Image (cartoon, rainbow, N blue to C red):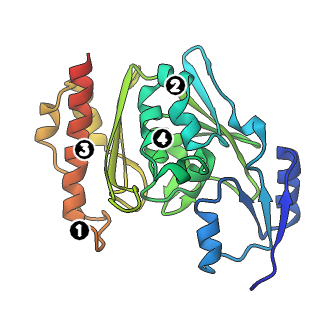
Amino acid sequence: MYSLSYHRANSINDAAGQLSADADAKLLAGGMTLIPTLKQRLAAPSKLVDIGQLEDLRAIQRDGDKLSVGAGAKHAQVAASAVVKAAIPALAALAAQIGDPQVRNQGTMGGSVANNDPAADYPSAVLGLGATIVTNRREIAADDFFKGVFETALESGEIILRFVFPLPERACYMKFPHPASGYAMTGVFVACTKAGVRVAVTGAGPGVFRWREAEAALTANFSAKAIEGLHVDASGLNADLHAPAEYRANLVKVMATRAVAELAAAR
């Protein structure tokens, strides 16, 4: 058993101070990824700085044409929020599909996005909606935030405070979940925004990405038929014991088609 200390932060400033004083310290919010990682000895931080109890990080509010969700908001909170359901129903629906009840009642949006697991659901909504990630130091556009497998633009000691989502005209998330974990083997978030259509894909590749060809096709003609002639390149997509890259490439197209069909039918 390795040595490990625990600090329950009483504010964001307190947490930031703890991180700056110890380069090997790690933030703890819901712990849905960090705790299993510690158990498997894949990480050995000197200290855990717990921010899971900070109420300021759980606020959800709408301000005009924007929705702000605190980084500490739990998945179940997002899924059940009347504010989220009224502003961006697709975001609430996405949160309701994450993991199982235990995970949804413990995991947080900030923890999921900061971890940037290639199969996580939230990154597709953050990127698909063109959200802004607000930290204790700056604001980061979603298009600049996700860098690859478990990598983001966050710097050492930087803490996500909240996510600011521009309200879309309409949006939908469709995913093919792994039957055991609930993670997205492939998930597609389609959003119709004032600037055009955005299509974000999770689970299929080494990180969340935008399907630009589909965005262009759907901006010109928003219909399932607009996707029929598109090709998803399987090279570089994930291949494992659950599915080869070619299967995931097909899933991207299938999930996107389903999302578009649902949005078109709801108009």
User: According to the image, label 1 marks what residue?
Assistant: 244
Q: Earlier in the sequence, mark 2 or mark 1?
A: 2
Lower position in the chain sequence, tag 2 or tag 4: 4
Distance from disc 4 to disc 1, alpha carbons, whole Å, reads 27 Å
Q: Mark 4, mark 1: which one is toward the viewer? A: 4
Residue pointed to by mark 3: 255
Q: What residue type is labelled 3?
A: Met
Q: Which amino acid does label 1 sit on?
A: Pro
| Label of residue 166 in the image | 2
Q: Where 231 sits versus 55, above or below?
A: below
Per the image, the residue denoted by label 4 is 95
Q: Nearer the viewer, mark 3 or mark 2?
A: 3
Residue 262 visible in the shown view: yes
Q: Indicate which disc, 4 or 3, sits on the residue closer to the N terminus.
A: 4
Q: Note whether residue 191 is visible.
A: no
Which of pointers 4 and 3 indicates the residue nearer the eye? 4
Q: In which quarter of the image is residue 242?
A: bottom left
**Which is more toward the observer, 21 or 203?**
203
Q: Position of residue 222 (x, y in %)?
A: 22, 25
